[in-house]
Amino acid sequence: MVGEALRDRWPVDRLVVSSRRRTQQTARAAGLADVPTTVDDRWTEIDFGAYDDRRIGDVMAELAAAWASDVSYVPPGGESMTSLHERVGEAVAELAGEATTSNILVVTHATPIKSAVVWLLGGGAEMIMRLRVSLASITAFRPVAHGLVLSEFNWCPARHLS
């Protein structure tokens, strides 16, 4: 049902997912198994390094404070916000032109979504920590004469089904 609501609102021409299994499972659960799909690891979640084995709720305050004060902070064995923003920016730049004439759906993780929004709005990596992305939400950009504009942020289809 969510997949139908999604396709009614946004027909999908192409799907991009990270190699993480959960993004591919989410796409299938949304009824998008038949859409031409590209796996692109630039859309993978930020590498939390030594923090990966710990519950996010237990470490996020510490990591958020570190990244909020210095986006170049790299957790042991992990990745900085700056590095994530650069790789996501490359992926977004590649899709931006195609997105003016095709509906591209990217199924990814919270931090890459925030980075893509910031990148498309012309901001730097320091803005990533100022956004919150809800689980199973949709963020959308629509083409207009002067480029892409943010048209949806944190839209949750399940909240709108009756």
Image (spheres, rainbow, N blue to C red):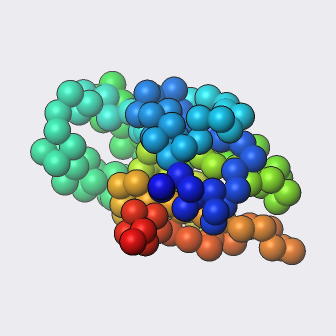
Q: Give the total number of marks visible in the rendering.
A: 0
- Determine if residue 66 is in view: yes
State the residue in front, 113 or 27: 27
- Side of 73 relative to 115 (left or right): left
Q: Position of residue 17 (x, y in %)?
A: 57, 36
- Determine if residue 43 is in view: no
Q: Quadrant of the C terminus?
A: bottom left
Q: Position of residue 133 (x, y in %)?
A: 39, 60
Q: Residue at x 43, y 27 (%)?
A: 21
Q: Position of residue 91 (x, y in %)?
A: 67, 42
- Looking at the picture, does residue 78 appear above or below residue 98? above
Q: Residue at x 31, y 28 (%)?
A: 49
State the residue in front, 24 or 140: 24
- Side of 50 relative to 110 (left or right): left
State the residue in front, 53 or 81: 53
Q: Residue furthest left?
A: 58
The part of the image, by quadrant, that contains residue 158 is bottom left
Q: Residue at x 43, y 49 (%)?
A: 111
- Side of 37 relative to 77 (left or right): right
- Looking at the picture, does residue 18 appear above or below residue 148? above
Q: Residue at x 56, y 56 (%)?
A: 4
